[in-house]
Structures are given as structure tokens and as C-alpha cells.
Amino acid sequence: MTKKVRTYFPYVLLFAIIFLVGVWYVKWNPYYHKAFLAASKHSIGDSIISGKAAAPPAPSWSAAWNYTVSYFKAVWQAVILGLLLGSLVQILLPKNWIPKIFGRANFKSTALAGIAGIPSMMCTCCSAPVVVGLRQRKASVGAALAYWLGNPVLNPATIIFMGFVLSWKFALLRIIAGVIMVFGIGYFANRWARDEEIPESFMSEDHNNDEEQGNLLIRWMRALLPLIRDTIPAYFIVVVILGAVRAWLFPVIGPAWANSLLVMIGLAVAGTLFIIPTAGEIPIVQSLMAFGLGVGPGVALLMTLPAVSLPSLLMVKRVFSTKVLLFVATSVALVGIFSGAVAMLFF
């Protein structure tokens, strides 16, 4: 073992332990038990948008606050884990690892990053700090986006829940459309962005152990505090706003409009903007379809709700250009609409 490898090894091992313990505690263990609930009851809970009712509450401060509380009760542990991993990526992993593995504007880097995102199983808001950390360590646009989208869209636990609760046809379509969404958006975003660089003023300082000597805790704080400042305030504010107006985004749909193309487009856009916890799309769609929503709009929501949201887009705006984020949001909505149309034809 070379001296350089020996120097890196304790830091890489520490990162691996924190990742494995954190993801096991926050994701893997709870989802393992929830899978049995999904299999036995064909449900994983009530819709976070409307509960057991047909429609969400009318816009009000009460509706905003109740949604905000429910949402953060579901995700606070994952948010903390995301901030922890996003900061530790910058100080524990060797500086050349991220550019070497995820730094090229080609399909290989995009594919590796998308696959790497699957085990963490986070929503895009909780994984946003990790994406910021990856971009600060010079991951390419496409690779960072594939990692970001791969977390929720190809989440294996969510797909298993979906099979038990909705049907395995929905789960299969989620896999096929999810692969197209994750790897397609990442690949074409590289072309769209021409591998743009983030501003030098926002690049991570050289916190690596072999390049900057100093207290590890101090270097961690230098990575963590700006990450919190740049992601959390906008995140919280927009969650409150979306919670208040969710009745406008998800109105009651009558039987005559159950499979309307207009409704499918509207819900695809609403799903792209709205924010939910991991796997929250399943009870939402289950509830809406029980009250008469058609399969096409339902599938459009299954694809768009987990993929991105207005808060998650704002959380990563410092490391992606506006044109890239508009491309991502538009592409997510279009994949949702296309998936809904396919479902109407074959389901």
C-alpha cells in the first residue's frame, strides 16, 4: 500500500461507515419493515396531500403549516443525512476521485452516477446537498443530475411498494420510464450545458487531508455551514407556500375528465413543482385513483412527483445554470406525460 493510499484510507473508511450506518438507519431498515406493510395491507399510509379526503384543504396558513409539519416529520432525518454526506464528500474523499469517476461529460460518468444514487434512496431535496457537494468537487452536469434523479426515481424500495400497493404493471412502467428519465436527462443535459463550470467563487476549498493541514472539525464546518445557508432557507419557505396552495395544484377531478389529456398535462406540471417525502407519490396516486382519477394522469404523477420539485430545484440553483434546471424540469414533465399516455394505451 503506497503512502498516498495509506493517507487517504482512514478518511475514505470513515465516509463509508457514516454512509452505510446513516442510510441503513434512515432508509434501509425502515423500508424493509414498510415492505411487509405494503404486501399485507396494499397500502403504505394516507395521502400527504389530502389525507383520507377527496380534495386537499383550501389555501390557508393552517393548510400551509399542517403540510409543512407533516412533511418535515417524514424527512428530517434524511435532510440531516443529506447535509452530512454533502459536506463530507468535500473533505473526506480524495480530491481527484469525483472528477475521475463522475467528471466527464460522457455516458459512462452519467451511468455510474445514476447507479450510485440508487442505494441512498433519498428524495431530491434530501439528496440536493450531496449534489451540491459533488458539483463543488467538479462532477459533470450530467453525472450530478443522474445521481440526483436516480435517488428517488429508481428507488428500489419505492418500486416494491408500488408493486404491492398499485400493481406490478405500474412498477414495471416506473422502472422503464425511470431509466429513460434518469440516464436520458443526465446524458442530454451534458450536451445542453456543454459541461458548464460552476462559478469559481462557489467551488469547494481544498479541504482534503493531503492538501490542507488542519483540524478536521474546522474543515467540516467550512463545508457544512455554507451548505446549510445555501440550501435550507429557500427549501423551508417554498415547502410552506406549496403546502398552502396544494388544493390549487391537485383539484378534484370529475369522471368526465378522469383521463383527459389536459388533466394529465396539468398534473404532470403540478407533480414537477410539488414536494413530497420519499414514496409519498404512492398513497397520493392510490387516493386520487380511488376517487376517480384515470390511469394516465395517475402514472404522470407517479413519474413527476418524486423526480424534482420547486424546492429541490432552488436548492441546487447555485451549482447549475437556469437553462439546465429549466431543461430538467421540462424533461421530467414530458416524461411524465409520455408515461401517462403509454399507460392509457396498455393498462
Image (tube, helix red, strand yellow):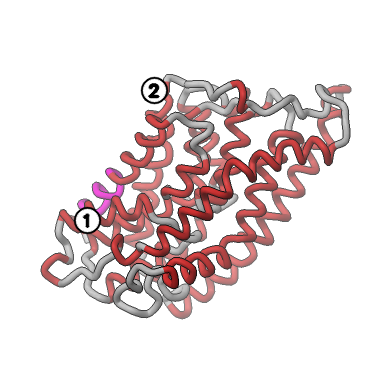
Residue at position x 27%, y 71% from top? 289
> What secondary structure do most residues of the magenta stretch adopt?
helix
| Residue that badge 2 annotates | 191
Q: Which residues are magenta?
A: 334-343
Residue at position x 31%, y 54% from top? 270
Please tell me whether mark 1 sits on a helix, a strand or a loop: helix
Residue 264, label in figure: 1
Quadrant of the frame with the N terminus = top right
Q: Residue furthest left?
A: 256
Residue 119, label in figure: none
Callout 2: 10 Å neighbours few (<14), some, many (20+)? some
Q: Amino acid at mark 2?
A: Arg
Residue 31 in the image: state x and y as whole percent. 57, 65
Q: Can the viewer see residue 164 in this picture?
A: no
Please tell me whether mark 2 sits on a helix, a strand or a loop: helix
Residue 61 in the image: state x and y as whole percent. 43, 68
